[in-house]
């Protein structure tokens, strides 16, 4: 970390700052320029608060040189993390997973039909929302506990592990038989929820917030890992930009960037990234090429009658076509399902 | 609402769509162009899901003509809402409130000293965080229950109503003596938390999310109001943009826009908007000029030693100077404290 | 186009509006709701100015239903445009082109060495800047006319067609022997420059502006095409977002979106998209997978000594490795070089 | 400037870097940490190219500590610049100017009528576009030379100095009698145009680009100043963000930030900032409160029939009302017209 001092900094100020830092076990290196003095800090600065240091009026700016996350940092953990979901399903480098299913669980028929269809096409996990984060209080909010029950029936019928979103820490007990707990984009910085799932051992699928930087995203992963649960899967689902042609803008460069910064697996959700079903296939292809470890895709047996997100759902026939193509691409990349 | 059909739409498709809408009690008006057919919908479309309608492949686009919120909508409720906090303190048109205090409650001495200082300068409410949303799990997370206790002591000592953030719905019981519950920017779309505070009758200070549109913000207010609690105060605190000179970009135009769209009061938080203490005063001035109903300002007795957000906190002397200026401006606008 | 009228609209206002539109050869369809009246316009609205119509105080909003561009619109021109550069080089569907070379032309040795290297690796065109748009007036501004001369020598030596940026319409004469004229991101809405290159017949490589929507980009293509030059190649090079891990955010979804909206070819510049040389290869792969018609890549014989943009340049060895991989991927997609 | 080296940096690499910098007259200070080595550079780094230095694979990152602009920098020039437009009109600290007029010059009657109206209300300069940057080639492009002639007639009739936009450097001769040359948002980084106006002595009104940072904006001012013309007036006109309720988002915090960073005057254009005429007045008030040196406002004698930007224009009566209010506010701030 580097602290840049302005012209107001007296010798005493510099001395005071250096001795404060020394008390915290940090060494410093001072470089005086004509207008500014630079204090380099050597040691573990994870716990230092940049904003506090900026509170002094002789401090011009503070810049981090090292990442503020440790457990999620590839420098501390060079090998790729392999997240075991079940005996048959593992997420991580070299393996490609496809999580598919409807936005919301609606009926027993619907979820079992979709589960069977996506399994046949090659999906490795089933997704489906029981608790739904909806922008409007007047929109369908999900079947809640009943939805979880139906998901578990679909799991029994097909053997597919299930992935579903947790929005409320009071519901955690109800998720005992869920295989992967999803933390949605809107809850990426719901820190109490992150702490809570940090206490369990289940794999956590952590979606990127709509307008969160990669660093903030890794800090949210760090919250879960600092709690003791290192089974975190990251999921890029599009960020908010000025462009309005698509609902969000898929940040495909996040894949190679994350592969450099962290050892955690990364998957892509092309359905939420644009909100347009016809764009799911081309973006899924880019995910494979970028080196992602999997996909999360919305599939509904009747998109035009879906209770939510119909516009971005594939029907089972479209999904099957896409999967035939994805399988060829995964093989091309030297990965396996 | 307007549904735009593409060239794939057959007569049967149009017929089916119209009869679906009629079943939901809506009337339609059809206009055929050369490439597109436009279906105008007349009636209450609040519960219609745009994304579902877009799920049909003969639908090109769907555009809202009316706002998706009702209780927060000024069209449905033309008079300004006046939110009563205590017998002495009301938030709303014509009255100007200043909420001041430290980012975090740290010690009894600190919070009481700051409370007395800001009261003397003219603040009408005391703020202070007991539960703190921090990007890093390694940063100070607030004193929790102990912090709430200290806030209540500061309230007893000064008579100032207190405003503090709720992050976890399980903590709601602990907030029984809090005067205004703050929902932070990162929880603006934590819908379960919104539903929960919608059940109580306390005033809710709803901060705008970092990258949420004004419409989404009003939909979150609608969540609280739909639950039965119409005491919502909106707080703009800067949005995320490409600019890096300031931490966020204060969206000052949100004030007149909200005054047009909603009857709810609006206050400005210039401390979080830029993260720079020297910018609090100029932005506070713009808030008064824009027609805001108040300010929320961070004040710390020793910013350089603050446990969080020191860079953006004023010290009590700076705050007092600002308040003298703000009082003149409020009088200029024909408002009162 | 749809005009939404508010409650202030009298019968006379509606009548006046309708007769104004009729005078312009347009038909209307009126739909009255409880709070709003909707006027649908049928006919060619390309020349209507939305902002003017919004100037009436009884107009709430105006929404386009059809695209504002014609010549660039795939609806008017369903077949893919094939842009012929030389007898040997054509840009368009089914063919994959790679434009490579240094950010700036620096010396005769440098440009000829790089040209020979990239040709050997399979590049189909040579890029190199003679006139450089630099953020700082104190940075190297390019060799200007001398740079163009050196580019033409590299063309003579290798046979590679050359692509270089035009920043100033007074320089157009100097570009007589240039094969493809590049319009840079910062000049995407320099309309006088667009009009000028619309008068020549050379292929124009039109880069997307840093913060321009796809629609604005196509409108800039329309400027060139409306002038008579339909040889436009679009180049996505990253957009400006809140993310700071990469210099820009590559909008990979622009490729399928453009393939739907327009018949013009689309290439990707992964070098400018992130500003990081190690990210060029993964993003180049996503470009092929997304269906792009080519790549534009910075290659320098000594990136650490480049006079500009060294951080994002590949050296010839890295470029050769990438090309071997790209060739396999292009074959996989069923395209050819 | 600080160069951060990664673990690949050998002693020789560090040595080479240091001697390269010494050759450029710069001193260095080296600080070795466990994972990184930091090289602080002391001296004038304006001409150093960050991207080049990043081109070495042992360089992790490069961070500026001082601003890259000199002539526009308040540190080098602490006193406020006062830009003299005519004997009667000066722009700068303590004086408040209002530039008003139509988006486009349309007819002699129109421009003279508007000029007389805005003068009567207290405007100090007349604006009006002769050359118009329009997104669509099919929109009205301005009256060009004829428009300039009409502007000069309005100047003769009223004595108001005129402000109008230059889009094309070949037109500079035609601007001989124009008082202030405007460089529009879309040309903020048209560097050849900046260099050209840097050669004349006229005041230049430099609008901020839609998605340009404050630093980039000041670098564009630096281009003009480095050419010899220090008469630059900055104009904030809204930036592009994710919010769609307003066309752009007015960055009001740019005013105090610029007042800190530069000695150049700053004005606000509330008309373009939102695109909504009813929002001009509230935003104009915030501009005065923020410390801006003036306003630029669109006024049209018949907004609903304007040939461009009708939606954001005030009519003369609305403008007069606003001016009465603005005069009181300017007096309140202790400034004069």
Image (cartoon, coloured by chain):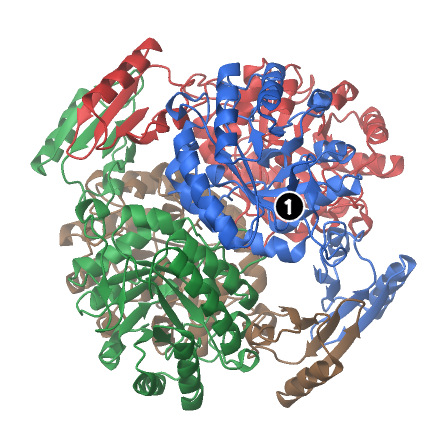
Chain colours: A red, B blue, C brown, D green
Residue B83 x/y as whole percent: 69, 42
Does residue B118 appear to the left or right of A313 in the view shown?
Answer: left
Looking at the image, which residue sits at the far right?
Answer: B23
Q: Nearer the viewer, residue A254 or A35?
A: A35
Q: Quadrant of the rendered structure where residue B87 is?
A: top right
Whether B8 is drawn above or below D142: the answer is above
Q: Quadrant of the C terminus of chain C?
A: bottom left
Give the residue number, with chain letter if any, for mark 1. Answer: B217
Q: Which of C30 and A303 is in front in this view?
A: C30
Residue C84 x/y as whole percent: 40, 68
Does residue A273 appear to the left or right of D251 in the view shown?
Answer: right
Residue C215 x/y as whole percent: 52, 63
Q: In which quarter of the image is the N terminus of chain C?
A: bottom right
Q: Give the total of numbered labels.
A: 1
Q: Nearer the viewer, residue C25 or A317?
A: C25
- Is residue C228 something one can see in this rendering? no
Whether D277 is drawn above or below B109: the answer is below
Q: Which of D194 and B299 is in front in this view?
A: B299
Does residue B229 appear to the left or right of C135 in the view shown?
Answer: right
Whether C107 is drawn above or below A14: the answer is below
Residue D119 x/y as whole percent: 39, 78
Q: Is mark 1 on a helix, strand or loop?
A: helix
Q: Quadrant of the rendered structure where residue D132 is?
A: bottom left
Q: Residue at x 20, y 56 (%)?
A: C141
Q: Which chain carries label 1?
A: B
- Is residue A45 something one can see in this rendering? yes
Does residue C335 appear to the left or right of B36 in the view shown?
Answer: left
Q: How crowded is mark 1: few (under 14 residues within 10 Å), some or many (20 or more)?
A: many
């Amino acid at each position: 970390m580097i602290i840049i001092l302005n012209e107001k900094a007296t010798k005493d100020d510099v001395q005071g700052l250096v001795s404060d830092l020394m008390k915290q076990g940090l060494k410093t290196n001072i470089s005086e320029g004509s207008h500014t003095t630079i204090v380099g800090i050597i040691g573990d600065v994870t716990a230092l608060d940049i904003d506090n240091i900026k509170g002094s009026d002789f401090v011009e700016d503070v810049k981090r040189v090292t990442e503020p996350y440790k457990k999620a940092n590839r420098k501390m953990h060079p090998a790729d993390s392999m997240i075991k979901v079940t005996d048959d399903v593992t997420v991580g480098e070299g393996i490609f997973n496809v999580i598919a299913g409807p936005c919301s669980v609606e009926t027993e028929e619907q979820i079992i039909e979709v589960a069977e269809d996506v399994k046949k096409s090659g999906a490795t996990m089933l997704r489906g929302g029981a608790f739904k984060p909806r922008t409007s209080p007047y929109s369908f909010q999900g079947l809640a506990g009943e939805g979880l029950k139906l998901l578990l029936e679909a799991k029994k019928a097909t053997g597919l592990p299930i992935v579903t979103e947790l929005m409320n820490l009071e519901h955690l007990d109800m998720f005992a038989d869920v295989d992967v707990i999803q933390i949605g984009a809107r809850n990426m910085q719901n820190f109490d929820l992150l702490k809570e799932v940090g206490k369990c051992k289940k794999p956590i699928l952590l979606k990127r917030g709509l307008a969160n930087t990669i660093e903030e995203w890794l800090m949210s992963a760090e919250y879960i890992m600092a709690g003791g649960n290192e089974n975190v899967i990251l999921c890029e689902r599009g960020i908010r930009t000025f462009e309005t042609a698509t609902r969000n803008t898929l940040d495909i460069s996040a894949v190679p960037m994350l592969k450099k910064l962290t050892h955690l697996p990364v998957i892509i959700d092309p359905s939420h990234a644009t909100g347009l079903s016809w764009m799911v296939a081309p973006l899924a292809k880019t995910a494979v090429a970028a080196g992602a470890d999997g996909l999360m895709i919305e599939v509904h047996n009747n998109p035009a009658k879906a209770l939510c997100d119909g516009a971005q759902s594939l029907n089972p026939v479209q999904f099957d076509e896409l999967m035939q193509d994805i399988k060829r691409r995964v093989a091309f990349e030297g990965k396996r399902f």
